[in-house]
Image (tube, rainbow, N blue to C red):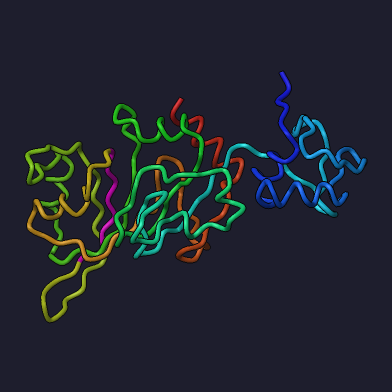
């Protein structure tokens, strides 16, 4: 069944202005439907079958949004907050219209891949504890991360509250000696999303994460060409891979 909606609602949902602003421009004759000027802002139409133009711009209808954000430090993974900047504040107004929300969370001081969408079903699939969606992080750790840590993580470690993590894959990279000790670059893949989990896992083996960024979530990989704070829509291939991976 075709989805019919009011013209003013379509235009406001697609970010062309408030309902009151849109009603004025419609009355001014600046909107056409299938090539015909319309002045009835309340007219019903099928946005997927009919062509709507605002001035000379074609109105592209969409009711879902899927965005990859390279989250910077200093913003929180929330839709609103009275004191802090949120990840939604990084989006252009036209991309806020469909009310996306972050799928999961990254700590305020953690960077990297964050998916924003208004697709509740997909978000549920990715966040469901039963799905064990893998998430991979790169980190700089204060401490000499070694094979014993790899073994411990591979078996699962006990956090300070008694929670036992699932097995995780730890890859050790370069190490650097500084005045205050050794720093280790690592890559870690976990299958849960407990609060501060990566930091708490390293604390359980006596080490401290000083920098953290997420580089993948399920099959979705961070686009390394995205600067911190920038975002882009998911490609069709990326969206399809996410949808197929967790059916």
Rendered residue at 52%/44% (across/down): 99
Specify start and end residues of the magenta stretch as a single range. 184-191
- Residue 150 at what x, y percent from top left? 17, 49
Nearer-the-camera pick, 24 or 181: 24
Q: Outermost residue toward the bottom? A: 179
Q: Quadrant of the N terminus?
A: top right
Q: Is residue 79 left or right of residue 177?
A: right
Question: Residue 120: image x %, image y %?
Answer: 46, 32
Drawn side of residue 22 relative to residue 66, left or right: right
Residue at screen point 42% across, 49% down: 79
Identity of the residue drawn at 45% across and 47% down = 115
Along the line of sight, the residue nearer the viewer: 54 or 75: 54
Specify the quadrant of the image occupied by residue 174: bottom left
Residue 75 in the image: x percent, y percent?
37, 61
Q: Is residue 187 magenta?
A: yes
Q: Nearer the viewer, residue 112 or 84?
A: 84
Q: How many marks?
A: 0
Tell which residue pokes out farthest to the top in this image: 1
Residue 91 position within the rendered picture, expressed as x and y whole percent measured from the top left: 53, 57
What kind of secondary structure does the magenta stretch mostly adopt? Answer: strand
* In this rendering, position of residue 3 left or right of residue 52: left
Relative to 157, does residue 131 appear above or below in the rendering?
Answer: above
Left or right: residue 177 versus residue 119 is left
């Amino acid at each position: 069944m075709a989805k019919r909606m009011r013209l003013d609602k379509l235009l406001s949902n697609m970010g062309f202005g408030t309902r009151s602003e849109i009603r004025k421009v419609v009355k001014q004759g600046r909107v056409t439907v299938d090539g015909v000027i319309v002045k009835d802002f309340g007219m019903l139409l099928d946005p997927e079958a009919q062509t709507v133009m605002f001035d000379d711009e074609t109105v592209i209808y969409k009711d879902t949004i899927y965005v990859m954000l390279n989250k910077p430090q200093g913003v929180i993974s929330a839709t609103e907050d009275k004191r802090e900047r949120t990840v939604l504040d990084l989006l252009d107004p036209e991309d806020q219209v469909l009310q996306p929300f972050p799928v999961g969370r990254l700590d305020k001081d953690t960077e990297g891949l964050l998916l924003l969408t208004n697709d509740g079903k997909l978000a549920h699939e990715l966040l469901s504890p039963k799905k064990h969606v893998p998430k991979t992080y790169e980190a700089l750790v204060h401490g000499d991360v070694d094979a014993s840590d790899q073994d411990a993580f591979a078996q699962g470690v006990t956090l300070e509250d008694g929670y036992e993590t699932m097995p995780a894959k730890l890859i050790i990279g370069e190490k650097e000696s500084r005045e205050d000790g050794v720093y280790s670059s690592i890559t870690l893949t976990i299958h849960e999303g407990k609060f501060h989990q990566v930091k708490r896992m390293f604390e359980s083996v006596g080490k401290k994460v000083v920098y953290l960024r997420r580089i993948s979530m399920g099959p979705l990989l961070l686009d390394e060409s995205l600067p911190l704070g920038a975002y882009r829509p998911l490609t069709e291939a990326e969206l399809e891979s996410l949808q197929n991976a967790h059916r």
